[in-house]
Image (spheres, rainbow, N blue to C red):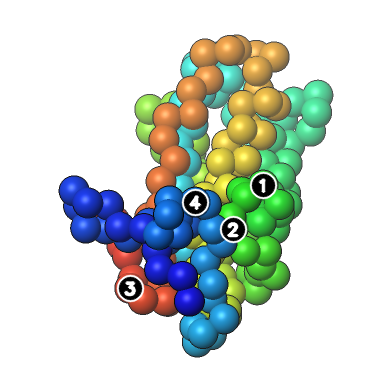
Amino acid sequence: MMMNKTDETTGQTFSHLDRAGKATMVDVSQKAETRRTATARSIVYLPGEVMAQLADGDLQTKKGSVFQTAVIAGIMAAKKTGDLIPLCHPLGLDNCQIDICVNGGNEIVINCTTTITAKTGVEMEALVGVSIAALTIYDMCKALSHDIIVKETKLIEKTGGKRDFKRA
């Protein structure tokens, strides 16, 4: 079994680097399968001229329902994470849920929650899903304004595996 490279300053182990510092896929063959979940969030700022088009909790454009299209795009992307990020394991997700809501301040809040029972986590799937949902909103609304800002994307929570994580 090959050891992982450790950062000399922090003592942290880089899971995708071997002892020689070369990229490697994490060997999960000896890990136990556990139920794993992850939730990621993106916030998209939409200027007033775009928000003015909001009706019945969604934006309608010539391309169709913005939020529903973003949900579908995010789910499709989460399912393809192993194809997009080189060292991610290809996973068959048990579930992927994307929720989109409008908060104050002209912001769209997108949450993506992924679940699986497996030997590895689904954080990257949640992050990819929410990122593509945010970019889909940008794409579908850019004809109205280019002042759209994808403000942040971050992991909110994960369970299963070595340790759980929850952002305060």
Query: Tag 1's secondary structure?
Result: helix
Query: Tag 4's secondary structure?
Result: loop
* Mark 3 or mark 2: whose residue is earlier in sequence: 2
Image height of 47 relative to 11, above or below? above
* Mark 1 or mark 4: whose residue is earlier in sequence: 4
Please name the amino acid that badge 1 sits on: Leu
- Mark 1 = which residue? 84
Image height of 137 relative to 154, above or below? above
| Residue drawn at point x = 65 percent, y = 18 percent | 142
Please say if the residues under marks 3 and 4 sit with CB atoms less than 8 Å apart. Answer: no
- Residue 22 shows which numbered tag? 4
Residue 163 sits in quarter: bottom left
Q: In which quadrant of the rendered image does the C terminus lie? A: bottom left
Q: Position of residue 26 (x, y in %)?
A: 52, 66
The mark closer to the camera, 4 or 2, is 4
- Mark 2 = which residue? 88
Q: Residues within 10 Å of mark 4 (few under 14, many from 20)?
A: few
Please name the amino acid that badge 4 sits on: Lys
Left or right: 34, with 57 as reference point: left
Please say if the residues under marks 2 and 1 sit with CB atoms less than 8 Å apart. Answer: yes
In space, the residues marked 1 and 4 are separated at their CA atoms by: 19 Å
In space, the residues marked 3 and 4 are separated at their CA atoms by: 26 Å
Please name the amino acid that badge 3 sits on: Arg
Q: Nearer the viewer, residue 9 or 19?
A: 19
Instruction: Work out which residue is located at the far front of the displayed protein and give it.
Output: 20
In space, the residues marked 4 and 2 are separated at their CA atoms by: 15 Å
